[in-house]
Amino acid sequence: MSANIQAIKEEIENYKVSNEEELEQYRLRFIGRKNILGDLFAEMKNVPAEERKAYGQQINELKDAVTTKFQELIQSLENLKGDAQEDHPDLTLPSRPDTVGAIHPLSATRAEIIRIFERIGFNVSEGPEIEDDWHNFSALNFPENHPAREMQDTFFVEKKPDIALRTHTSSVQVRVMENQKPPIRTLSPGRVYRNEAISARAHCVFHQVEGLFVDEGVSFADLKQTLYYFAKELFGKQTKVRFRPSYFPFTEPSAEMDITCNICGGEGCNICKYSGWVEIGGAGMVDPNVLDNCGIDSKKYSGFAFGMGIERITMLKYQIRDLRLFTENDVRFLRQFTSLS
Ligand code: DAH
């Protein structure tokens, strides 16, 4: 191949254009009427006869290369234009619709419970989710090896000394009483863990809110009145509350708390199992042993405590029939709560 042809071939291969003008220069040089290949064709007559065939073939190949490259250059210029357009979006286009997020129903219920109790002087306190045996069990009057510990299927993190995921928010009561002097009025919302099979009614991770009131002369009447007020504020004025005797190691006397079923209004339906009542938590007078364990003089002070499940309350309030919906993150469920604040 003649040095000249080789040089032109390389020039074509390396050619780049960044605008229309440069493309036109390419066209004039290689394709236009007076293009550089014309000189090569004219040269043909000076080539010795025996080499002419090979020479002709080389120029023809060069000609093909010229046109292929021309198409490539046109395409590359188009692509450049496309990129440039992306850098400069059309500002006159209407914007894409924005979807508004929603507050999770559990967060909304938690916030509403806090607002209700704040109005009667309760503050909010929190404690760790990984707890030691003392705060989750022993200080709360669960004797060692007592079957009451089996009531709550515990996830242990370490054994001896026992460290576990807290099974209830009652552990925060202990921490507050250890660190504060009465009067104490506190609400402790938080996540709790129990080794339970997941179903429509139970989960191994759920939320509780604990309430504690300690002062001189606190009575069961105070407990009842506080929870009457709470139930009416949260579920409506028509709501009635009843207490059934129960047992918890950390309260004496202890009670379970029911409200009239807000779905049927007490008439009876499948949610309340046709009893007209649904359970929302446990409550009682703080056992004097617990006060003493936490450094509060049980001869001088008394108190009441209660604990409720936030999932359960939310299910009743919004008529949600499956607890698993709270953790599945299905937007078709979550979107139904966009109006909550
Ligand atoms: N800790 C109990 C539970 O998880 C609930 C409870 C009952 C809390 C009675 C209390 C109470 O503060 O007084 O089932």
Image (cartoon, rainbow, N blue to C red):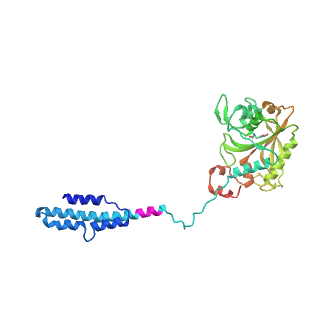
Using residue 311 as the reference point, say whether residue 120 is left or right of it.
right
Using residue 6 as the reference point, say whether residue 191 is left or right of it.
right
Q: State the residue lying farthest toward the bottom.
A: 33
Using residue 240 as the reference point, say whether residue 42 is left or right of it.
left
The magenta-colored residue range is: 79-85
Relative height, residue 63 to residue 223 (above, below) = below
Quadrant of res 123: top right
Residue drawn 74% across the image and 33% down it? 147
Quadrant of res 29: bottom left
Residue drawn 48% across the image and 62% down it? 86
Residue 245: x %, y % from top left? 83, 41
Seen from the viewer's position, the closer of residues 28 and 304 is 28
Quick one: quadrant of the N terminus? bottom left
Whether the magenta-drawn stretch holds residue 84 is answered as yes
Seen from the viewer's position, the closer of residues 46 and 238 is 46
Question: In terms of image quarters, where does ligand 1 lie?
Answer: top right
Whether the magenta-drawn stretch holds residue 329 is answered as no
Residue 42: x %, y % from top left? 18, 68
